[in-house]
Amino acid sequence: MTMMTPPPVDQQEDEEMLVPHSDLVDAPTEPMEVSQAETAASTVESLPAEEPPTLKFTWTIPNFSRQNTRKHYSDVFVVGGYKWRILIFPKGNNVDHLSMYL
């Protein structure tokens, strides 16, 4: 096997090598096998789409503009079988505006 040292970074910009040089390939290449696609009935696209579960979550924070805490968590709620909660930073998370995360 022949090892090649890459050229310095300033020369690499002009010479872009997209495929390995022929003397670097170890094994002979073989054609790729192509199989026939399964019937359309078994593909994901052919299955009926289910509507995702929806839920309206209302979180009331009394005196929000007067909150002096750095961050505030909502209560845990469940949507689609998963537990969620909201995290807010009223004065921002390293920014000067409200930051909100799900």
Image (cartoon, helix red, strand yellow):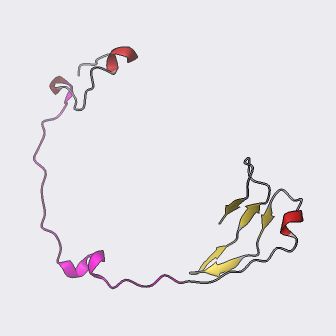
Quadrant where the C terminus sits is: bottom right
Can you give x and y, in whole percent of width and height, for residue 39 in the image?
17, 78
State whether residue 70 is above or below residue 11: below
Decide whether residue 33 is among the magenta residues.
Answer: yes
Give the residues in magenta.
Answer: 24-53
Chief secondary structure of the magenta span? loop
Using the image as rendered, state which of residue 63 and residue 72 is in the foreground.
63
Front position in the image: 70 or 4: 70
Give the image location of residue 91, x and y in percent.
80, 55
Q: Is 7 positioned to the left or the right of 83 in the image?
A: left
Position of the N terminus, as image quadrant, is top left
At 24% from the left and 19% from the top, the residue drawn is: 2
Residue in the picture at 10% in, 47% down: 31
Give percent across and percent down for residue 4. 28, 17
Give the image location of residue 62, x and y in percent: 86, 74
In this rendered view, identify the residue nearer to me: 20 or 29.
Answer: 20
Which of the pair 27/46 is nearer the observer? Answer: 46
Is 68 above or below relative to 38?
A: above
Determine which quarter of the picture holds residue 10: top left
On the question of residue 60 being in view, the answer is: yes
